[in-house]
Amino acid sequence: MRIFSLVGLLVLGTAAWIFIPSDKSIKRINGVSLVNPPRPIESLAMQQLHRVNAEWVAIIPYGFSRSGQGSVSYDHSRQWWGERTEGSCMLIQYAKENNLKVMLKPHVWIAGEGWCGDFDLATEAQWQQWVTDFQRYILNHAKKADSLDVELFCIGTEYRIPARERPEFWRSLIRDVREVYDGRLTYASNWDNYENITWWDELDYIGVDAYFPLTKGDHPTINQIKEGWDPVKRKLKAFSQKWDKPVLFTEFGFQSVNGAAGKHWKVEKSSENINLQLQADAYEATFRALENESWWAGGFFWKWHFTMQNSNRYRMEWTPQDKPAEQVIARWYAGRD
């Protein structure tokens, strides 16, 4: 299914490229990544998202693997309600009841490690088990997505090694998903791995979890952060043109601590290091940098909690809730055309 076509324009003797949606109802995605509730919630809870003028939500049913093992399991009784198929299906229904579009985004968590970016296996037998289990996990959710009229399905998240080294598996998986799901497809590549994926032609969006390091300082200005996007934008634009696909930020965002616009995995998270204004400034700079980029399809900021009993716990975390960044996002999301 071709959603976007690439049109070349000659402007003042130089080639400029813009994406023209073939479906005029498609708008830039102003989305929120939801934290799965541990216990059932009511549909009314989705109305919180109107505070930021969101029109999309990412719902994330989790699967689990162990380091060095090929199995992928899901729907454990000890999982949070929202992480299981049952809960994610209810969240989809609640989103629909509140006029929100949905990206269903299965994500495998590696027990004892967390991030699946370094996931690797030693033997082909282990890989074949992973192929079987991961396919079952993805197709289970793809079928649910189709039955519930989910607009966008993400076929995987941040697998660096198998995404690069097993392209035929992903092409086969995409064909299988399209047999059971009729909506648009993407894949959530890590910010430093999207260029290593060779099967973007099979998908509707180039998906990037866009945690690019933009500055080196602890207290950068809005302009410094905005300028930090310049080399990133050039690469993303060229990559979008290469594949004739728009780029969707399947995740993006900033922690509310000093240095959050740089290498986020290295920032010190302590009460002395909290910087709520930097988080707001980083969002402001990001929207300013990207607002006129026609290759950018929007994205899903990370992340939104339905329950926050102890709000102090979240003051240095990714969520913009009840922080200055929330108002920045609300203002920019309200201005989407």
Image (cartoon, grey):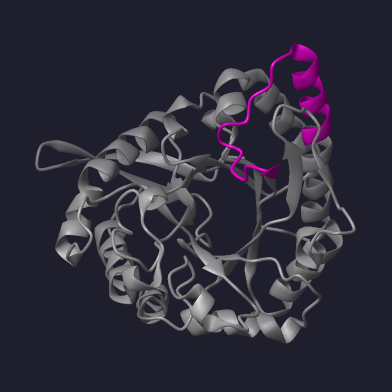
Residue at image location 44% in from the left, 45% down from the top: 247
Where residue 127 sits: x, y (%)? 75, 20
Q: Residue at x 67, y 43 (%)?
A: 112
Please tell me which residue is depicted at 72% across the width and 25% down the height of the picture. 172
Give the total of numbered labels. Answer: 0
In the rendered view, does 321 fall on the left or right side of 143?
A: left
Q: In this view, does 131 lie to the left or right of 117?
A: right
Q: In this view, does 322 lie above or below 117?
A: below
Q: Which residue is drawn at 19% across and 62% down?
A: 220
Which range of residues does the magenta coloring cover? 109-134
Farthest residue to the top: give it: 124
Quadrant location of residue 225? bottom left
| Image-based side of 159 in relation to 131, left or right | left
Q: In this view of the protein, which residue sits in the foreground, 201 or 327?
A: 327
Q: Establish if 126 lies above or below 106.
A: above
Task: Give whichever of 60, 267 is nearer the camera.
Answer: 267
- State whether residue 53 appears in this view: no
> Is residue 328 shown in magenta?
no
Q: Where in the figure is residue 309, as x and y percent of width and height? A: 63, 84
The quadrant of the rendering that contains the N terminus is top right
> Quadrant location of the C terminus?
bottom left
Of residue 267 and residue 46, the one placed in the foreground of this image is 267
At which x and y percent is residue 279? 34, 69
Residue 125 among magenta residues: yes
Residue 45 x, y percent position in the rendering:
68, 83
- The residue lying furthest to the right in this view is 77
Q: Can residue 188 be seen in this view?
A: yes
Q: Quadrant of residue 13?
A: top left
